[in-house]
Image: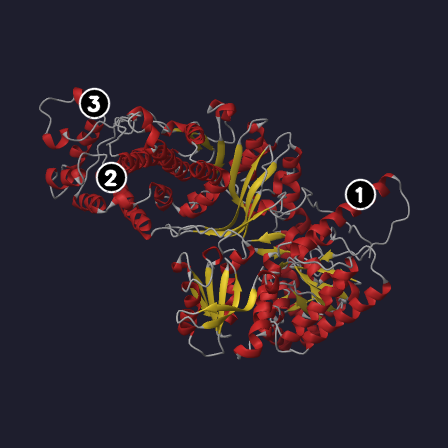
Amino acid sequence: MALSPNEIKSRAISFIHDHKDDKYEKGESQIFWRDFFNIWGINAKTVGIFEERAKTLKQTTGFIDYFWPKTILIEQKSRGEDLDKAYKQALDYCLTGGIPDEELPSYICVCDFERLRLVNLTDQTKSIEFKITDLLDHLQRFNFLLGYEQREYKDEDPVNIKAANLMKVLHNELERNGFKDHPLKLMLVRLMFCFFADDTGIFASKDDFLFFLKEKTKEDGSDLGLWIAQFFQILNTPIEKRPANLDEDLSKFPYINGQLFEEGLPFAQFDKKLRDIIIKTSEFNWAVVSPAIFGSLFQSVLEEGERRELGAHYTSENNILKTIHGLFLDEYIEEFENAKKRKNTKALESLLEKIRNTKILDPACGCGNFLILCYRELRLLEIKVLEIIFNKKEDQGMRQLSIEWLNGLDVDSLYGIEIEEFPALIAKTAIWIMDHLMNREASNAFGSYYVRLPLKKAPKIHIGNALRMNWEDIINPNQLSFILGNPPFLGKSNQSNDQKEDMEHVFYGTGIKYGLLDYVSCWYIKTINYISNFDIKVAFVSTNSITQGEQAGELWPWLFSNRIKINFAHQTFKWSNEAPGKAAVHCVIIGFSKFKTNKPKLYIYENINAEPFTKDVTNINSYLTEGSDTVILSRRKPICNVPEMVYGNKIVDDGNYLFTEEEMDEFLKSEPGAKKYFRKILSGDEYINGRNRYVLYLAESEPKDLKNMPKVLDRIQKVKEFRLSSTKGKTKEMGNYPAQFAEPRQPQQNFLLFPRTSSENRIYLPIGFFTPDHIVNDSCTALPGANLYHFGVLTSLMHNAWMRRIAGRLKSDYRYSNSLVYNNFPWPEYATEKQKEEIDLLAQSVLDARAQFPKSSLADLYDPLTMPKVLRDAHNKLDKAVDKAYRSKPFQSESERVEFLFELYEKYVNTLTSQIKAPGKKRSLS
């Protein structure tokens, strides 16, 4: 079974520590590489050969340090030796003919124990050299060892960013010259079309529009408005209906149609500055700009607040392609390659028919970026198919190239819904431009000029609230092929009143408690109701929140009850781009339908900034991992017989009871009697980072003492006033008891402390023991009455694997929850007393290992790069003991642990259900 990214990361850390001092090729090389391959769970001896004989270019016999046929050739040198010389030696072995062609490696790796160079022989631009100590940053480079496909997506082209900035300047200057609201938006879209048309062949010659601006208008810009108004009118007038005496510089422009230039615009006064900006923008080479940039153009001319209110984020081409490939493009390309390989004309014609019948809906289309790129990729594939059919020898002379033959897929195959007018205008215009660019591609492929002017067909972009519309009025589902897009995200705290009403409207009758759900979840409900029993595949970019924590427990049971199956999924990745006002959020991509594909594909990310690798799985669950469709729900009590976990104290004091050490010392100078009421307070941040903070804990104070401490009384009075001013009833009520915490939950016995938020980079969630005189803040949870056995199991890889799969996230950091993570955790079913005693001892060894580094914080100790070997070894031994308490057979990966825990969880829940139906003695499971 393949190891999980976390398991690979853990093994890599061990490898770095174990081999950081290796120096000599003789004696240390083989164990070095055996341990290296073991990072990915590969037995080096079973896949390759150490010291393989091979001929050099000088026809002498040499020995390849390690050779894995068709995969990798490794040349190892002692520390400090020349890697260039080592690479030349390795390359010699490949060039002599001593290695059969069918066994030649795809990669050469040379290393001197300190540095490693990996050369991709099929694409040397992907080669890399790095220090062994930096291996964690480059693990994804070795996914080829597992046979995983590594897919890379292009970053945003800087030229697109420059175009966006030019358009923003133009927008602002048009606004300054009197254009507002709808006229401003329409003027901007028309000018953008003209800039593209001038550089991409829509207009007769390149720079016709630029020439018109420079030569026909005055330098002071005073007549620019009149000329542009006349220019737009000409673009909307058929050639035969134009005046006979029309200015020749206007008459050469084509008739566009498509309603883009139909509406009249109010006159506005132009000036020299605006004329110069329009000319400068026109001088830019728009032929190299992707029409998909229109999305960022839209984003660049909106205020940040308005984008936030709408939940609008610009999706980069990189991430759109991830969605399109998984949804349908990979399948179409595979069908094309198979037909091409078999030279099967009928299969190619069948694919051509499929492409031309493809209809796509984006129900939150924004500026149309998803639709634009879908159309581009479909047209490019259509051209490839046509080229093969047209060039087949048996068809030469028999098939006449015609406009009708090329005029297959058209823009009317695209459907969108957008709530705002401006992005809808941009979407329609950008799709027309993309259509023209694809017509140019077709012209180049077949040697015949092909242009669709005047525009006769249009993409069907509807303006309105998609959550209140009947999608069947836009397109009947029996005609639709795919639904995709990037619906607005917006967590509950960022939703407007209108958006909350949208959620109430969409979720009505579902029984789902939608109050915690992100706004994007509405599109899942609406889509499932729309596709009903139709064979329609769907893919949405979404916030990762809907696959985690409480949101997953609310949303996915309903989805699964409606027979939804996940066909492909991208696990959490960081979505950012270089557009103005760029968005940076943590996303997932989920492809689903009401039928199951033969090979669900999971795109796994080693970290949120990495490129994904692909894994074929049997089933993808709501947590976007391989496994059954079981959904973990919050529960008030643990499913096993273990201590109950509680939240920390909620103080609600406006900061009046909280002190740094310096502030406490200063306070006690004038109020020394308060010393006995100060306690250390444990919040997640202070606990993990080793910082001290104090709280004035008055729950057990004597009223007489308080009356003799005026500064303490002043703090109590301020807390009272703060609480009484609250709009929350419970807080107001606690204003009558200001010396108490608003929600007191202080353990009265020794307890284990759990920070509720912890970095995703840590293999282990840092937890620790404390006494009741330490006050627990509500950024933590506490487990009163916990012992070493509880600590041992809860700090193990078993529990951490469960936590990583089940917990909610704050961005990508883990959010530990007692009701979701701890209460649902399946403890070992048949752990013997001897096994528990061993876990006790090894748990204590972990605490002892921590104690050896009193000056280091838990953040230091549990950083994967700085974790001391003694602590790592102690955890490794404890992990093995806990694993054995679950079963005798070792677990090979984190995924295997989680699958086992899910099965055990289902067993325990079924047992509890049976006990409820037939009450009896509860079985101890710990």
Amino acid type at mark 3 = Pro
Q: Where is residue 829 in the image (x, y as percent from the top left)?
A: 81, 54
Amino acid type at mark 1 = Asn
Look at the image and tell me whether residue 210 can be seen. yes
Q: Are marks 1 and 3 in contact (CB under 8 Å)?
A: no
Q: Where is residue 179 in the image (x, y as percent from the top left)?
A: 27, 37
Amino acid type at mark 2 = Thr
Question: Label 1: how many residues lie within 10 Å, few (<14), some (14-19) or many (20+)?
Answer: few
Residue 238, numbered label: 3
Q: Nearer the viewer, residue 514 or 598?
A: 598
Question: Label 3: how many residues lie within 10 Å, few (<14), some (14-19) or many (20+)?
Answer: few
Q: Name the residue under label 1.
A: 910
Q: Which residue lies furthest to the right in this view?
A: 920
Q: How many angstroms separate mark 2 from mark 3 (CA)?
A: 21 Å
Counting residues from the start of the chain, the first of labels 1 and 3 encountered is 3
Counting residues from the start of the chain, the first of labels 2 and 3 encountered is 2
Counting residues from the start of the chain, the first of labels 2 and 1 encountered is 2
Report the coloring of the rendering: secondary structure
Q: Which of marks 2 and 1 is in front?
A: 2
Q: Considering only vertical position in the picture, is 51 above or below 232?
A: below
Q: Considering only vertical position in the picture, is 282 above or below 431?
A: below
652 horizontally vs 369: left or right:
right
Q: How many angstroms separate mark 2 from mark 1 (CA)?
A: 65 Å
Residue 200, numbered label: 2
Q: Quadrant of residue 458?
A: top left
Q: Where is residue 653 in the image (x, y as percent from the top left)?
A: 63, 59
Indicate the secondary structure of the residue bearing disc 1.
helix
Can you say which quadrant of the picture contains the C terminus?
A: bottom right
Look at the image and tell me whether residue 636 can be seen. no
Q: Nearer the viewer, mark 2 or mark 3?
A: 2
Q: Are marks 2 and 3 in contact (CB under 8 Å)?
A: no
Q: Are marks 2 and 1 in contact (CB under 8 Å)?
A: no
